[in-house]
Image: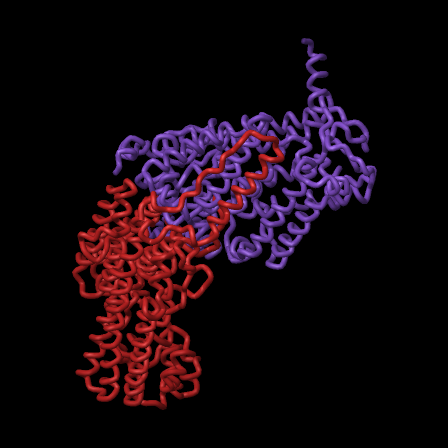
Chain colours: A red, B purple
Amino acid sequence: MSVAALPIRRPTAIERRPERQALRPAIVVTACILSACSTNESKPGPEASGERQQVLAALADDVLRPAFADFASAADDVRSATETHAGSLSATDRDAARASWTSAMLVWQRAELMQVGPGAPATMDFPGGADLRDAIYSFPIVNTCVVDQELVSGEYADRAGFASGAAPNRLGLDALEYLLFNEAPDNSCAPQVAINTSGQWASLGDTEIQKRRADYAAALGGILADDARRLVDAWDPAVGDFRRELVDAGFGASTFRDQKQAFDAVYSALLYLDTETKDTKLALPAGLSIECASATCPEALESKFAKVSKQQIRSNLEGLGTVIFGPEPESDRTLAALLGAAGAPDLRGRMQAELTAALAAVDAIEETSLADALDADLASVLALHDAVKKLTDSLKSQFATTLDMAALGGGIGDND
Amino acid sequence: MTTTEWRQRLDAVANAPRDAASLAAFRVLFGLVLFASVVRALAEGWVRDFFIERSFFFKYWGFEWVSPLPDWGMYAAFAALGLAAIGIAAGAWYRLSVATFFVGFTYVELIDVTNYLNHYYLVSLLCALCFFLPLNAAWSIDAWREPTLRRSTLPAWNTYLLRFQVGLVYVFAGLAKLSEDWLVHAQPLRIWLSSRSDLPVLGSVLSEPWAPHALAWGGFLFDTSIVVWLLSRRTRPLAYLALVTFHLVTGALFTIGMFPFIMTTVVLVFFSPSWPRRLLPQRLTRWLDCDPTPQLPSTAAALPSTAPAAIGLVGHRTAWLVAAYCLIQVLVPLRHHLYPGDVRWNEEGMRWSWHVMVRAKTGSVTYRVTLPGGPQAPSRARTVLVNPRRYLTQYQAEEMSGQPDLILQLAHHIARDFAERGHGHVQIRADTLVSLNGRAPAPLIDPNIDLVTVEDGPWRARWITAAPPPLGPERAITAQLALP
């Protein structure tokens, strides 16, 4: 729709008149403008909204929904692999279950940068938030002891009840990693915890523990697949249609206050790279955080059992790259394209280079696992941290300023 | 003309009796807007977000002693503000009400610098002025209860003082826009408008390449000249119409809360003293005047005097106090000229200067904290990184990232926190990268300076870096207008 086709309010003729009369048109104009602001009838349709809405549509259709669909497919593989393993308890099936978990985890790590709407926390700060992310993966609030406690209680056998009632850190990919990759006969709880003081754990025996781990993993595999499908459905135009809420933000959709808030939600999701990837996954294990009392803290790595922390970071970077630059190199309906349109093509190029450098820094870590790298080549891990920081610095400064984005949450007030 | 004659003339102008109706209406409307602001703050959950859920509060220099009350106390404070606002509007226990609102509102604003807004500062100033002006002399419960308080007229300087205060906001807001960023590059307006394409009617217009420049120049001319148009009786109605439109548009474009409502209300002091009598039914104004006389003249000049003659101003101590107040109000916004560099970058003299909407500034701040290795092993000193989010809400962190004195404050807090945790005396340096009005990010703080050794104060801060260069020519108006 062209501008000429839009309903245009003709300016009111203003005549010289005494104050009494002059205030009346002011009130009328005020009321007219206010009414124009508060009704949808006079709003331009999506086709008139410009490139920002096209970017949101491309984000939903080309980035977010495909990522969630990929994960749902991977989660289905986890479901079937863990069920097969629970039935056979064979090493081969266990390895297949592990492989399916690794695939799903790395797909999910890209989606970690896409916690918009249903995937975001269910708080007032995050419009449309439904906590679906935490049900799928609760890092960094991981607690293997509670998984061991559930193992003893056996409550996971009631799959439906467990899915709806259990805390997130007893579910999802993090609990699955512990159940599938941890072969130690002991549990991770302190000696004074009930399952140890009561002798419940000791009474299970190794065989029963392995069986229960497989059963618990199968239960979680099924719940994970269901949660992944819920996320896909939440975005599906034929089901939850959160796609419309994002794309039509400011144009009739009600979840976001306006289109800017929808972009703020996307930006907030990108900040995962700053708070989680940079600070929690890299700075803390590398001894750059005060929470790490020694030179390095490998016990703080994200993937303690599957040892895929390095690949997880790479997937995070890939996820950020997809959100900003689109799924294809030539994508033109992207946040990066908006940078160019806003007169900052230099920033686009610089962030692309910083992303490439960060990915190269991951690949430059020769050790298979980040834990080994912390021990053998700390400098390479620190280099990766620095490379990621350059990217997050750009993200939080010129990128946010140029695209007028601000993070959600924390009590955003007025401005002037 | 002799000095005496000058004083007599000034005295005559300043103390000329003016219908009290205008200032009474100002009081009522101002009180109602304040009440709406308090209700809105409660409804938005800002008491919780701004005062209860925060663990750290940025202090104003000289007001470090101001701290938030317990949870119930903050809610009680806002309840008191709401009651005081009603008291102001109704003119009930007026002095107590306006004093309560001034003290309470200013206290609330002093709790955390990141809550600072220019229009909040204006509210505090207007409340302070209202305390000294007898705005309950008409159309108030106080005047109804106590006939000796009633006045049909008030000295003209009461109105002039309020006009001065309100006019100052526009003039300095206009002067702040007298910059290359605003007038040549239309920044930061261009950035903000680009994200408002969803606005009804306006959205498609704002996406035109010329729109930011048109609005930038329009805003500049509006701010710098509106007071002149409001002062002239002939242009005042049109000027007010333009002003209402301007504030409605900016209110629709930006998240500026009550600012449009406050300004469109307080600007009414520029209208003639009897404007409410012309708008309201005579029966109502007569009732508000507490006047049983059936035939009340419609103009103040003919009103029977119900109070002693206006007090003299010139030569009085009041005159000197008013003059001193006005001088301070002129000088404070100009103090940033005492500091070298761009005030939008170094923020020295930024607050209380009516620099309204002239900068889009966000950045990344990381503290490098060097822990001492101890006297036995000083070589084992270790450096850790601290993300401000460890101590701040997301909103506080974003506000802090562009304000050097706040970055310094948090550095001091981190030093105290680390000392309390047994890490001894640490050194803290800040790695900052800040983008101003779309510029490439640049360090805001000298990364080599140990901020623990730096004291905040009104003097020049040498630990703040020089502002980045002007925006490049590719963003100049000519380039923008050449876009398809």
Q: Is residue B382 above or below residue A20?
A: below
Q: Is residue B308 above or below residue A50?
A: above
Q: Residue at x 75, y 42 (%)?
A: B283
- Nearer-the-camera pick, B437 or A59: A59
Q: Residue at x 50, y 45 (%)?
A: A32
Whole-percent x and y of residue A104? 24, 71
Residue B462 image-quadrant placement = top left
Quadrant containing the N terminus of chain B in the rendered view: top right
Whole-percent x and y of residue B310? 76, 27
- Nearer-the-camera pick, A372 or A281: A281
Would residue A416 be visible to someone looking at this image?
A: no
- Nearer-the-camera pick, B429 or B410: B410
Q: Is residue A242 above or below residue B342?
A: below
Tell how many labels. 0
Q: Is residue A191 left or right of residue B224?
A: left
Would residue A49 be visible to someone looking at this image?
A: yes
- Nearer-the-camera pick, A187 or B309: B309
Quadrant containing the C terminus of chain B in the rendered view: top left
Whole-percent x and y of residue B129? 66, 35
Q: Is residue A23 left or right of residue A111?
A: right
Residue A68 image-quadrant placement = bottom left
Whole-percent x and y of residue A137? 33, 70
Q: Is residue A85 left or right of residue B55?
A: left
